[in-house]
Amino acid sequence: MLKNVKWLNIVLSVCEIAAGVLLILYPAVSSDIICYLIGVGACIFGVISLTQYFLLKIEDSLFRDEFVRGIMALLAGIVIMVNRDMIIGLIPIALGLIIVSSGFSKLQSAVCAFRIRYNKAAWFAGLSAVSIILGLLIMFVFSKTFAKDLLFRVIGAGFVYCGLSDAITQLFLAGGYTAYAKDYQAGNIPKTPAVQPEAPVYTQPETPAAPMEDEQVPEENILS
């Protein structure tokens, strides 16, 4: 299952790279074509998410959101392609959100790498930070200050970076997880025992000692 998910994510990364190259080479492409590309990309992402969900085992799919994410991505792709005029001005925002989403995906990989004690966790976190910062700059700064051609070239470069970094992250993380699973099964990684609460300790109250038979009675008590 892990192998299938890895290659599905790599296919998605290749789509990101292809879209980025097109934006770099043809920045003056019409907004309608960009809407179609975004819509098709969202539909592809939805199909991939649904495929990931149905590849999971039943016990692994109870708390996963690939099904809902896939349906929503398909709906978003269809809406983008049908109502192009309504979202032409939102194209840079949508593309920036995709780049930010790629960054958070790599951040999740960094957290997973840290949990399995993989030594490239910090590296994954650095790759994710670049994607997140670039996506935020595109949405809030570059979309208001850059010319159209330059803006789309920057977005295209961001897509190429996200595709390459996502593919590299998936390949390295899959290898690290495989090595971790083998070490765990071989018993090289000790299991952390569950902490048991300490039972309360009950002590019996002390009873006063009985007086000794030869204990002397004070004189004042005798006089009284």
Image (cartoon, grey):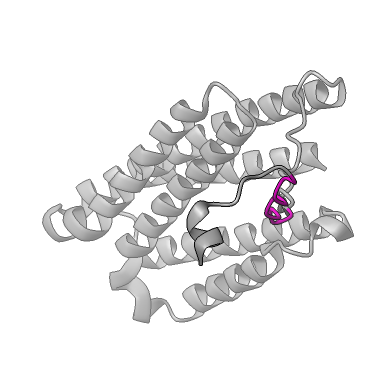
Q: Position of residue 110 (x, y in %)?
A: 52, 36
Would residue 26 be counted in the magenta stretch?
Answer: no
Measuring 84% from the left and 21% from the top, which residue is drawn there? Answer: 187
Would residue 208 be counted in the magenta stretch?
Answer: yes
Name, please, the residue furthest toward the front. Answer: 223
Q: Is residue 206 above or below residue 50?
A: above
Q: Is residue 26 left or right of residue 201?
A: left
Name, please, the residue furthest toward the left. Answer: 145
Q: Magenta segment, principal secondary structure?
A: loop
Q: Give the position of the N terminus as an image quadrant.
A: top right
Q: Position of residue 201 (x, y in %)?
A: 72, 50
Q: Position of residue 26 (x, y in %)?
A: 34, 46
For residue 74, say whether it is visible.
yes
Picture quadrant where residue 22 is located: top left
Q: Nearer the viewer, residue 210 or 172?
A: 210
For residue 155, say whether it is visible.
no
Q: Is residue 58 above or below residue 75?
A: above
Q: Which residues are magenta?
A: 204-213
Q: Is residue 45 above or below residue 179?
A: below
Measuring 48% from the left and 32% from the top, which residue is drawn there? Answer: 124
Measuring 61% from the left and 34% from the top, which residue is drawn there? Answer: 170
Q: Position of residue 80 (x, y in %)?
A: 48, 74
